[in-house]
Amino acid sequence: MALVSTNSLTSLLFITSSLLLLLGSFHGTKAQSTPPIVNGLSWTFYDSSCPKLESIVRKRLQKVFKDDVGQAAGLLRLHFHDCFVQGCDGSVLLDGSAGKPSEQQAIPNLTLRLESFKIINDLRSRVQKECGTVVSCSDITALAARDAVYLTGGPEYDVPLGRRDGLNFATANATIANLIPPFANASTILTSLATKNFDATDAVALSGAHTIGRGHCTSFTARLYPNQDTTMDKTFANNLKGVCPTKDSNNTTIMDIRSPNKFDNKYYVDLMNRQGLFTSDQDLYTDGRTRGIVTSFAVNQSLFFEKFVDAMIKMGQLNVLTGTRGEIRANCSVRNSDNSFLSTGVEMGQIGLAQS
Ligand code: HEM
Ligand SMILES: *[C@@H]1O[C@H](CO)[C@@H](O)[C@H](O)[C@H]1NC(C)=O
Ligand SMILES: *[C@@H]1O[C@H](CO)[C@@H](O)[C@H](O)[C@H]1NC(C)=O
Ligand SMILES: *[C@@H]1O[C@H](CO)[C@@H](O)[C@H](O)[C@H]1NC(C)=O
Ligand SMILES: *[C@@H]1O[C@H](CO)[C@@H](O)[C@H](O)[C@H]1NC(C)=O
Ligand SMILES: *[C@@H]1O[C@H](CO)[C@@H](O)[C@H](O)[C@H]1NC(C)=O
Ligand SMILES: *[C@@H]1O[C@H](CO)[C@@H](O)[C@H](O)[C@H]1NC(C)=O
Ligand SMILES: CC(=O)N[C@H]1CO[C@H](CO)[C@@H](O)[C@@H]1O
């Protein structure tokens, strides 16, 4: 019944976008040396099914960031957390419920911004109004992260699209196992990222996302109390003690003291001046394997942007669900099978609801 037509429509779209991919080799006028893209994702995925997708997201986020630029950092981090835990499948967006703990309940999530989830759901409903239920929440999250970078001064780049939303919650344990803590050293970062096929350049470039956004005291006060981390600049440390008078202060501070809201290469200049906020930041300059990369990005922003784009495109393809796997969620916070709105039979754009 509906399933059959849904599936054939999906494959029709799939064939159409593959054709477009072949025809569209002129696409991408931006200077962008891209890593290979995985089967099932394409640069033109929604060109026929939702041509206004990218402009809807961009226009809305322009307004959101104008009101509060901090939301850009929140959205960039959300995409990172989505991709590192169980792949870029939108699982980080799922609300937990009794017996079904979600990624959100895991410790590293506690500092994700509540507003980020609201912004994604708002974008989702704007896109849905225009195109029906064809665009996945994981793709919206990837586009929002790209726009967060671009609209705060970073590089413009194309995002391969066609991710589908996962049906499984990631456990709190999987979340903790895949997200690196701020007290990690460079060895831990390199080893952990290598398991996801990132090299040292990727690791240093991705960490450059900390050129925007904030951290809570508890993410770095172990560097201040009881003993001050000797790799930290003394004036910087004293200022941080003002922001965080005790180890468990409930306060936040900016991560890049030179240009906290601008996506640029100043984060690396901070590191060279021993003003990195987390151990995981500062140790990239202490460790001989990554120090030269930090320096090269500090002196050449174009180089940083180029490597960051490469690494983001790689990150955005981690364990993606494509084709007929997963689903297109009608509400980013809940799986379709748990969506009471859908199960009461209210009519929706049906494309992509084939699942489980
Ligand atoms: C290398 C491993 C990484 C570690 C250890 C790490 C750790 C952290 C921590 C502890 C925070 C602050 C949380 C808080 O206290 O509020 C944070 C914030 C942030 N992280 Fe990372 N992170 C890493 C990699 C990344 C990557 C790969 C990205 C994106 C590409 C990213 C983007 C961000 C952003 C934008 C913020 C600011 C969020 C906000 O202002 O709401 N991080 N990170
Ligand atoms: C999760 O990790 C905790 C602590 O390491 C462990 O006690 C627990 O059994 C783990 N749970 C699952 C479901 O693996
Ligand atoms: C890095 O951290 C790990 C885990 O805490 C530790 O075993 C290792 O000795 C550290 N490496 C260096 C070079 O400090
Ligand atoms: C929070 O940090 C600000 C500086 O960023 C500082 O002025 C304020 O006193 C801090 N609040 C607390 C409760 O420590
Ligand atoms: C911590 O700060 C946040 C935001 O400023 C506030 O909503 C929360 O109630 C505070 N919590 C405690 C324990 O002070
Ligand atoms: C900076 O990096 C860009 C991009 O890789 C490169 O084309 C350029 O030559 C570099 N500039 C300098 C001064 O090294
Ligand atoms: C999406 O799901 C959440 C969690 O069930 C619910 O609170 C919210 O109202 C839903 N949003 C829409 C637009 O249906
Ligand atoms: C346990 C817990 O506090 N989980 C939170 C994870 O983050 C989301 C968004 O900030 C919250 O809605 C959850 O309550």
Image: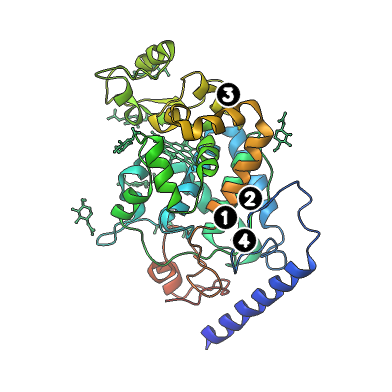
Disc on the earlier residue, 1 or 4: 4
Q: Position of residue 338 (x, y in %)?
A: 38, 68
**Residue at 71% across / 48% down in the picture?**
32
Query: For the residues carrying marks 4 and 2, which lies nearer the camera in this image?
Result: 4
Q: Which residue is mark 2?
A: 57
How far apart, in angstroms, are the residues tagged by discs 4 and 3?
33 Å
Q: Is residue 97 left or right of residue 43?
A: left
Q: Position of residue 258 (x, y in %)?
A: 56, 20
How far apart, in angstroms, are the residues tagged by discs 4 and 2?
22 Å
Disc on the earlier residue, 1 or 3: 1
Q: Position of residue 217 (x, y in %)?
A: 35, 26
Amino acid type for the residue under numbered disc 1: Ile
Q: Which residue is mark 3?
A: 259
Q: Which residue is mark 1?
A: 140
State the SS at label 1: helix
- Residues tagged 1 and 2 counted as in contact (Cβ below 8 A): yes
How far apart, in angstroms, are the residues tagged by discs 1 and 3?
27 Å
How far apart, in angstroms, are the residues tagged by discs 3 and 2?
25 Å
State the SS at label 2: helix
State the SS at label 3: loop
Amino acid type for the residue under numbered disc 2: Val
What numbered label is drawn on residue 37?
A: 4
